[in-house]
Image: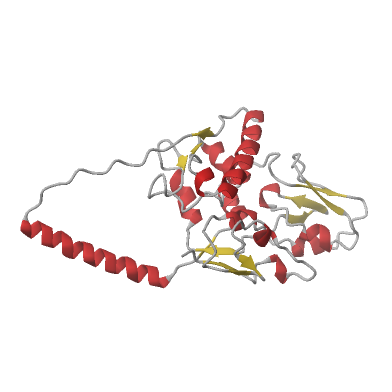
């Protein structure tokens, strides 16, 4: 049973006048209601994580460590646990900006061959995100994401063991299972904010990231800076500095501006100093 909850302190619903429903709207299992996740309905696809603008979804999957371990593979491959026990429970948590960051380090492959049969909503989401990422990679002259099908590791042939070795292995296995059960009862939950992860990678923003435009009506009140949950805005020498790789496109800055001076753009065009 999947263990997912919503951090209501970080959730956009904690901001006055904001009613974000991204997690509920994109959950194919209709497991999210009133900012609660029904564990019996949740299939751990991760689409709520992919769509949450502020990383408010807590889960029992350590996506941060998992993404970092992908880079140690030769070649690096994103895959689910149906392809390998070392993979993610599901790849639905990915978005085009995460793919861009990983593919910018070295050529990257991804196995989505089982998605359509397993979780059609995830298959559709990944197809769109991969296509968008590949378009940006092509424009940048980088290798495209490669679609692969990872073959499950072959079963090891049985090995004859002596009586003493058999019982030693049996006791060791029982002890290992007891440890696993104890760990499972702790029910660890991990917070994963794609924006924070991207910042750690020192990713270079491209057209896959949101942009921001400001008009001359800006009064430099600083409210947008205070409202931004990802700290994508700051003042420097009288100029408003926008850091695209930190922007999740949540729109809090736009909605809170008393002068209506801000406008989110679908694509980042390289402008950091916007006023």
39 or 98: which is nearer to us? 39
Instruction: Report whether 107 appears left or right of 50.
Output: left
Picture quadrant where residue 188 is located:
bottom left
221 or 138: which is nearer to us? 138
- Residue at the location (70% across, 65% down)? 12
* Outermost right residue: 217
| Residue 249 percent across, percent down from the top left | 73, 53
- Residue at the location (17% across, 46% down)? 158
| Residue 3 percent across, percent down from the top left | 50, 66
Q: On screen, 208 above or below 142?
A: below
Is residue 265 at all visible to an observer of this figure? yes
Q: On screen, 235 above or below 109?
A: below
- Residue at the location (72% across, 63% down)? 20
* Outermost front residue: 117
- Residue at the location (28% across, 69% down)? 178
| Residue 33 percent across, percent down from the top left | 65, 68
Picture quadrant where residue 217 is located:
bottom right
Q: On screen, 112 above or below 222?
A: above
Instruction: Report whether 103 appears left or right of 140.
Output: left
Q: How many marks?
A: 0
| Residue 55 percent across, percent down from the top left | 61, 60
Instruction: Report whether 222 appears left or right of 81.
Output: right
Give the colour scheme shown: secondary structure
Is residue 230 at all visible to an observer of this figure? no
39 or 14: which is nearer to us? 39
150 or 133: which is nearer to us? 150
* Outermost left residue: 163
């Amino acid at each position: 049973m999947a263990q997912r909850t919503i951090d209501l302190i970080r959730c956009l619903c904690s901001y006055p006048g904001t009613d974000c429903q991204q997690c509920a709207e994109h959950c194919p299992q209709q497991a999210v209601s009133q900012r609660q996740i029904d564990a019996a309905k949740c299939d751990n696809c991760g689409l709520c994580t992919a769509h949450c603008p502020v990383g408010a979804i807590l889960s029992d999957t350590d996506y941060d460590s998992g993404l970092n371990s992908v880079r140690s593979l030769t070649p690096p491959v994103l895959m689910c646990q149906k392809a390998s026990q070392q993979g993610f429970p599901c790849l639905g948590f990915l978005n085009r900006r995460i793919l861009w960051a990983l593919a910018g380090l070295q050529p990257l492959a991804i196995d989505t061959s089982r998605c359509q049969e397993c979780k059609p909503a995830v298959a559709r989401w990944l197809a769109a995100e991969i296509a968008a990422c590949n378009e940006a990679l092509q424009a940048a002259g980088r290798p495209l994401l490669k679609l692969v099908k990872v073959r499950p590791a072959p079963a090891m042939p049985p090995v004859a063991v002596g009586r003493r070795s058999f019982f030693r292995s049996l006791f060791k296995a029982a002890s290992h299972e007891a440890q696993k059960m104890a760990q499972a009862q702790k029910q660890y939950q991990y917070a994963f904010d794609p924006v924070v992860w991207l910042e750690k990678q020192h990713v270079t923003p491209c057209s896959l990231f949101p942009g921001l435009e400001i008009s001359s009506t800006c009064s430099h009140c600083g409210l947008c800076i205070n409202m931004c949950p990802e700290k994508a805005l700051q003042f420097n020498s009288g100029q408003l500095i926008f850091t695209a790789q930190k922007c999740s496109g949540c729109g809090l800055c736009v909605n809170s501006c008393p002068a209506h001076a801000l406008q989110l753009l679908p694509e980042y065009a390289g402008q950091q100093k916007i006023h």
